[in-house]
Image (tube, rainbow, N blue to C red):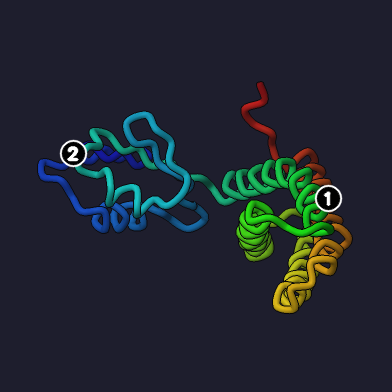
Amino acid sequence: MKLIIGEQHIEYKEMPSADEVIERINESLTEGHYFSHFIADGEEVYDEHEEYLERKLDVIGELEVVIRTEKEFMNDVLLSAEEYLKRAIPEVNVLADDFKRVPSSDSWARFDMLLGGVEWLNDMLKVVCNSKVRPSNWEMYQQMTSNMQAELSKLGKAVEKKNNGQISAIIKNDLLPIFERLEKEFGETIDSEFVRRNLN
């Protein structure tokens, strides 16, 4: 297998373990650089890297590691978050309406997806707030993180009480406006301080 990390080209005679590959990647990261994703025989892999390697390492011929500067990494984070929100906002509206009525098992499955999305978004906001290369309006992101945590706490209590009307109201009146504000802020931040790539 061939491992490519920047200018380094490492040929493995014997197949390394997933842990060895990840350790090699981590050793290659210098101050101010972040692991973004890797390309395994042409396939871009953005999530669950370790699991992917454990499943497929024995069949990978070439593994290219993509490393970003802090500014590039922040740019990617903001673009991903904005893209997620564009897709999520219409779904969140529908979900709020579902909980006004009697929610189906599908509604609950989408509710779980929403919680997963909020958790991911929260992690993205923490990355923005903790980065050395922060957008000028990062304090607003910090405030939105705090607001989202408060709404999640209220949502948890409504779920415990099985109060579907309250769940609907929190999603529609509290979470949705946060999502809409964040989408707008992410867009403005990207357009004023970062770069939009891959516009087709």
Of labels 1 and 2, the one closer to you: 1
Image location of residue 198, percent across then percent down: 62, 27
Q: Is residue 21 above or below residue 119?
A: above
Q: Residue furthest left?
A: 13
Q: Residue 138 appears in which quarter of the rendering? A: bottom right
Q: Which residue is mark 1?
A: 180
Please state which amino acid type lies under the numbered disc 2: Glu
Q: Are marks 1 and 2 in contact (CB under 8 Å)?
A: no
Image location of residue 119, percent across then percent down: 63, 62
Which residue is at a point 31% across and 38% down the rendered structure image? 63
Front one among 198 and 55: 55
| Quadrant (top left, top right, bottom left, bottom right) of the N terminus | top left
Q: Which residue is mark 2?
A: 11
Disc nearer the start of the sequence (1/2): 2
| SS assignment at label 1 | helix
Which residue is at a point 22% across and 41% down the rendered structure image? 10
Image location of residue 6, percent across then percent down: 37, 39
Q: Residue 96 appears in which quarter of the rendering? A: bottom right
Q: Is residue 18 left or right of residue 35?
A: left
User: Pointer 1: residues within 10 angstroms few (<14), some, or many (20+)?
Assistant: some
Front one among 59 and 16: 59
Q: Is residue 59 left or right of residue 191?
A: left
Front one among 185 and 149: 149
| Quadrant (top left, top right, bottom left, bottom right) of the C terminus | top right
Image location of residue 2, percent across then percent down: 23, 36
| SS assignment at label 2 | strand
Which residue is at a point 79% across and 72% down the rendered structure image? 163
Residue 135 visible to the viewer: yes
Please state which amino acid type lies under the numbered disc 1: Glu
The Cα atoms of the two marked residues, 1 and 2, are separated by: 48 Å
Q: Is residue 32 above or below residue 76?
A: below
Which residue is at a point 27% across and 40% down the rendered structure image? 3
